[in-house]
Image (tube, helix red, strand yellow):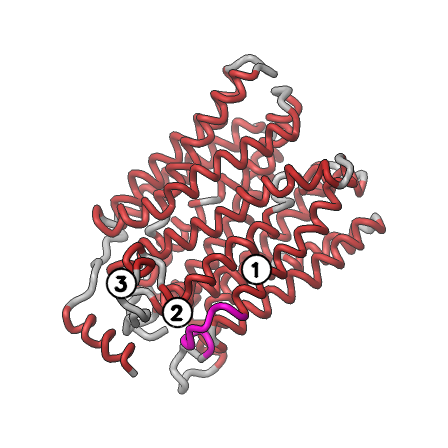
Amino acid sequence: MSATTERTAPAGSALDRVGIPHSLRWGFLAVLVFMTGNGTESNFIAPHIQSVLHSDTATAGTIISMYGVAVLVGSYLSGSLADLWGPRRVMQLGAAVWVVFEVLFLLALGAGSTPMVWVTYFLRGFGYPLFAFSFLVWVNLVTPKERNGAAVGWFYVMFTGGLPTLGSLFALGMIPAFGGGTGGETGAMGASIALVVIGFLIAQFAVRDPRGDRRVAAPDRSTLEVLSAGVRLTVREPKVLMGFLVRLINTAPQYGMFIILPAVISDDRGWGQSRWLTMTVLVYATNILVNALFGAVGDRWGWRRTVQWFGVFGSSVGLLAWWYVPQLVPAGSTWGFWVSVVAGCVFGCLLAGFVPMGAIMPALAPESKGAAMAMYTTAAGGASFLGSAVVAVVLGLGLGNAGVVWAFVVLYGAAFVMVSFLEVRQGESAAERERGRAMAAR
């Protein structure tokens, strides 16, 4: 990725001033709609697989963990392939992979075939990171450095707005519309395909910025060099490795809670599936409301300090609150449910403190931004795998759900230490700004 920062046109638009590149404005909406479709199943897929396949928790967990592996690999490829082909072509590939293998996944569920469910769900895992994270590369190509934190924040407003927030809200409406129960869940997943297609069409026909249509990597670099650049950079630069690990830990607890909390909130605490979905919507709606805010806070107060104190420390406190408050209030009580929602919203809010990591990673390697973003997107997707893997390992050791939560707190502690080493220079020099104006004028 070029080290030169390019400005959008018109440079003085209101969207540019708040951190949304004007030329990519419809792409942000496309990510929101696409991720809403992708997030529809996020809070019922584990019990759904168990019910349809008449399997145990371990089988469903393994299927979801392998889906996480595909997300991790797809997240790395999103950055590398965007360097090779340009972000738009990678978004096209991601949408095609998602739709084809979602249809096959639903057919496999209908046939009750565990091997086919495993294969099709695994392959579908490549879809959303190729679509969403290649757009994030596009955002980093276009956005001036002084507004990069805010732009990444807006990306995560849309990303989290879909997965899991509006996705859960969509499921909340669609499941009863299709008759409720397992059949209603299947119907909701089928309907989610339409949202993914709409998101793709918005990106395909409404986003016209030409920088997404061309190769980002230098023409003299081979395909192998581009594809391996992120791994080589991580080996060569310890700070990039630390940034990768911090981003990997960032949302891992979110995915872990998606596995352990549905049964706790719905069954153990007696609030039912609809209230669990309502809780999820509200927790991540809170995250949406402050994602852009924390991007702007990072631009002003410092990216590293924002991540360390709001993101790492704050999220660990919020995670403990989201787990323990539901245990301390009366099971089944209405007021107890709403107090538990507030505790979850604390986690959702402070999780947004990690947003500046999307600006820190390319700043750690200004001459290798594409490779750095490949590792960032890999970590963002890998969080799904790490979250499910921590659940599998801790429960396998017999430490229970509380042990899972404390394992994530320990990981946050490690992230707190690593962030201390990730100080980078923010803003552009006068020379960099002049180069940006010259590039935009070409």
Q: Position of residue 181 (x, y in %)?
A: 76, 35
Mark 1 or mark 3: whose residue is earlier in sequence: 3
Q: Is residue 397 visible?
A: no
Q: Secondary structure at mark 1?
A: helix
Report the amino acid beneath label 1: Gly
Q: Position of residue 175 (x, y in %)?
A: 71, 39
Specify few, some or many for label 3: CA neighbours under 10 Å numbering under 14, 14-19, or 20 or more.
many
Specify few, some or many for label 2: CA neighbours under 10 Å numbering under 14, 14-19, or 20 or more.
many
Q: Is residue 211 a member of the stretch shown in magenta?
A: yes
Residue shown at 48% from the left, 47% from the top: 160
Is 109 placed above or below 126 here?
above
Mark 2 or mark 1: whose residue is earlier in sequence: 1
Residue shown at 57% from the left, 56% from the top: 34
Circle 2 is placed at which residue position?
370
Q: Please state which of residues 104 and 394 is positioned toward the viewer in this rendering.
A: 104
Question: Which residue is farthest right?
Answer: 111
Circles 1, 3 touching at the beta carbon (< 8 Å):
no
User: Label 1 to label 3, Cα distance in Å?
Assistant: 27 Å
Report the amino acid beneath label 2: Gly
Q: Is residue 351 a member of the stretch shown in magenta?
A: no
- In this rendering, position of residue 33 left or right of residue 289: right
Q: Position of residue 40 (x, y in %)?
A: 62, 46
Is 266 placed above or below 369 here?
above
Q: Is residue 140 visible?
A: yes
Q: Secondary structure at mark 3?
A: helix
Circle 1 is placed at which residue position?
199
Quarter holding the C terminus is bottom left
Q: Position of residue 206 (x, y in %)?
A: 50, 68
State the extent of the magenta-drawn residues as a range: 205-213
Residue shown at 44% from the left, 32% from the top: 345
Q: Quadrant of residue 279?
A: top right
